[in-house]
Image (spheres, coloured by chain):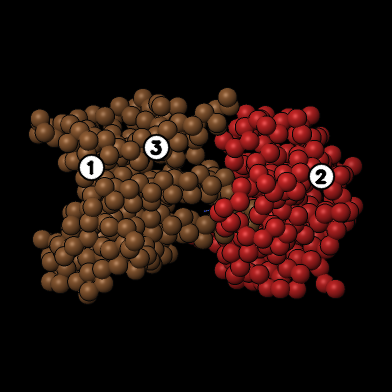
Amino acid sequence: MTPARRGNLVEAGVLLAAIALPLILEALGEDFYIGFATRLLIFALAATSLNFIVGYGGMVAFGHAAFFGGGAYVVAFLMQAGIFSAWIAWPLAVLAAGVAALAIGALSLRTRGVYFIMITLAFAQMIYYSIVSLQSAGGDDGLPLEQRSTLAPFDLASDTTLYWVALATLAACLIALKRLAHSRYGRALAGLRQNEQRMEALGYPVDRLKLVCFVIGAGVAGLAGALLANQNGMASPTQLYWTQSGMLLVMVILGGVGQRYGGVLGALALLGLEEALGLTTEYAHFYIGLALLAVVLFAPRGLAGLAGLRAR
Amino acid sequence: MGALLEISGLKRHFGGLWAANGVDLAIERGEIHALIGPNGAGKTTLIHLISGALRPDAGRIVFAGADIGQHNMHARVALGITRSYQITQIFPHLPVLENVRLAVQSRRRDWGSSFRMCRPASADFRMLAEAEEWLGRVGLAEAAGQLAADLAHGQQRALELAMALATRPQLLLLDEPMAGMGPEESAHMAALIASLKGAQTILLVEHDMDIVFRLADRISVLVAGRVIVSAAPDVVRNHPDVRRAYLGDEVAP
Ligand SMILES: Nc1ncnc2c1ncn2[C@@H]1O[C@H](COP(=O)(O)OP(=O)(O)O)[C@@H](O)[C@H]1O
Ligand SMILES: [Mg+2]
C-alpha cells in the first residue's frame, strides 16, 4: 500500500470515529463531553485557519482573535436584530471577517516580521476595545444569544447536530486545504515562504498573493467564531482579546506550523491539557508553557511532525 | 522603431551619495549590452532601477515605448523585463524543477492566473514539460529532482538563469552572473550566455573583461553614477577616458 493510500485510510477511519463519537458518548451517559468535543472541533477549525496564514502564507499574524471573536459577534448582533438563520448569519460572519482582514491586511502586509506581529496585534486590540465599549454589544459581559442559530433542515438545538455541523465544516476545510496546497496558488505560496524577493522578480504580485491568503484565513476564522457563539450561547469579549490570538498561535506551533493537521493536533493537545490539568492544578499554564518549549526545542514540526503526518 | 530600452537622466541617491547621477543608456533589440565599471560605480543600482526594485528620484525609463519608471517590479516582469541577482536568489528548499516551474507558471499571458486554488498544479503538464526543457538548456536536467540548496554554487547560478529565461523576457538583466564562480563554472556560464546571443536582448554586468569583450555587441562604461562611454567593444577598448577612469593601460591589447 502506498503511503498516500494508507494516509487516506487513516483519515477515513478517524473521520468515521469522529462521526460516531457523540453516539458513543450518549450510550455511555457522558453527554457532557459532546459539548467539549464540539469546542475542540471549533478551535481546531480556528487554529487551522490561522495555520493557513502563518504556515502556508508565511505571515506570523497575532490578531486572529479579531476575526474569530468577530464572527461570534456578527451572529449575536444579527440575532439581536431578529435574524436567526445560520444560512444568512454565518456567511455574513465570514464576509465581515474577510472584509476586516482585507482592510487590515492592505495596511499591514507591507511590514514584515516583528512589525507585522505588532501591527496585527494593534488592529485586533482596536477591534476588541471598540466592541467592548459598545453598550449594544454588552460591554465586558458580552452578548448572549437568545437561542442557537436555525439551520433548516437541521436542528441545531441538539448538541449532537451542532457537533456534526462543526465536524463537517472542519472536514470540508481540511479537504479544501489539501487541494489548495497543491494548486497553482498553493505552489506560489510555497515559493513566497522561501523567497519573496525572487517571487516578485519572477513577476508574481506578492502583496496580493499574501492578502488573499490572509483574507481566506480570516474568513474561516469568522465561520469558526459563528460556530463558537452557538456552542457557548454567547459572544464574549475574551474571544476577541489578544490572549485568544496567543492561544491560537500556541496551538499552531504545538501542532505544527504549515502542517495540514497542525491546527487540529494543536487544539486537541492544548484543550486536552487544559481539561486534564485545569481540573487538578492551577498551574495548567505552566505545563502548557513547558510543552510549548519542548516542541520548539525538540520538534520544530510540532506534533504533526512527531506523528509522521508531514502532509501539507 | 526606437531602442528597446531608453534611459535618460536617471538619478537615484542614497543619503548624500548619487549612485545614479544622470544615467543615459539605450539598449537595442537583440544585442548583448555589457555594463562595466569599477566597484561602487552604481551598476547594481542601475539594475535595481530598471527592474523596479528601486524607484528613481529623477529621469525616465522607457521600455518598448512606454514610460515604466513608476511601475512596480512584477508589472515590469509582465511587460518583459526580468533580472537575475548578484547574490543568488532561488527557492533553496524546493526541488530544482519546481524552481523553474514556478518561473514558467508566472507567465499569466500564457497560462492565466496563479490564484487558481482547486486544480492540482501537477496537472499542468505543459508547464512541467517546459520547465524540464529550460533545465536541459542550462545543463541541469539531471538535477531536476534535487533540492536547489544541494546544488553547487555554479549550478545554482545556472538555475537562476533558467528561471529568468523561463519568464521569457524581452530584456534580460544579468548582474554579475559569474560572481563567485571558478574558471570552469565561469566558462560554462559564458557559453550559456553566448548561446543566447542574437535571440535574447541582454544587459550584462560583468567584471571579467575577456568575457565582456568576447560576448558584448556594445559596452557601456559606468563611472560614479554616469555612463561615460557607450560604444562597440573596439571603440571602448581604445577610448582614452575609459583607460584613465577604469581599465588601466595593462588591459589594452
Ligand atoms: N541601499 C543602499 N544604501 C546606501 N548606499 C547604497 C545602497 N546601495 C548602493 N549603495 C551605494 O551606492 C553605490 C553604488 O553601489 P552599487 O550600485 O552596488 O555599485 P556596483 O554594483 O557598481 O558595485 C555604492 O557606493 C554603494 O555603497
Ligand atoms: Mg554590483
Residue A151 appears at what percent x and percent y? 31, 62
Residue named by callout 3 = A16
**Tag 2, which secondary structure?**
helix
Q: In whole angstroms, how far apart are the C-alphas of marks 2 and 3?
A: 59 Å
Q: Are marks 3 and 1 on the same chain?
A: yes
Amino acid type, residue under disc 3 in the picture: Leu
Amino acid type, residue under disc 2 in the picture: Ile
Image mark for residue B193: 2
The residue drawn where x is 26% and y is 72% is A83
Q: Is residue A106 left or right of residue A129?
A: right
Q: In whole angstroms, how far apart are the C-alphas of marks 1 and 2?
A: 67 Å
Task: Give the colour chain A carries in the figure.
Answer: brown
Decide if ligand 2 comes within 8 Å of the CB at mark 2.
no
Residue named by callout 1 = A34
The residue drawn where x is 76% and y is 55% is B168
Q: Are marks 1 and 2 on the same chain?
A: no
Around disc 2, counting alpha carbons within 10 Å, would you say few (fewer than 14), some (14 to 19), or many (20 or more)? some
* Chain with red colouring: B
Amino acid type, residue under disc 1 in the picture: Ile
Residue A115 appears in the figure: no
Q: Is residue A238 left or right of residue B45?
A: left
- Residue situated furthest front in the rendering: A27
Decide if ligand 1 comes within 8 Å of the CB at mark 1.
no
The residue drawn where x is 81% and y is 68% is B3
Dot 3 or dot 1, earlier in sequence: 3
The residue drawn where x is 34% and y is 69% is A88
Please, which chain is the residue tagged with disc 1 on? A
Residue A172 appears in the figure: yes
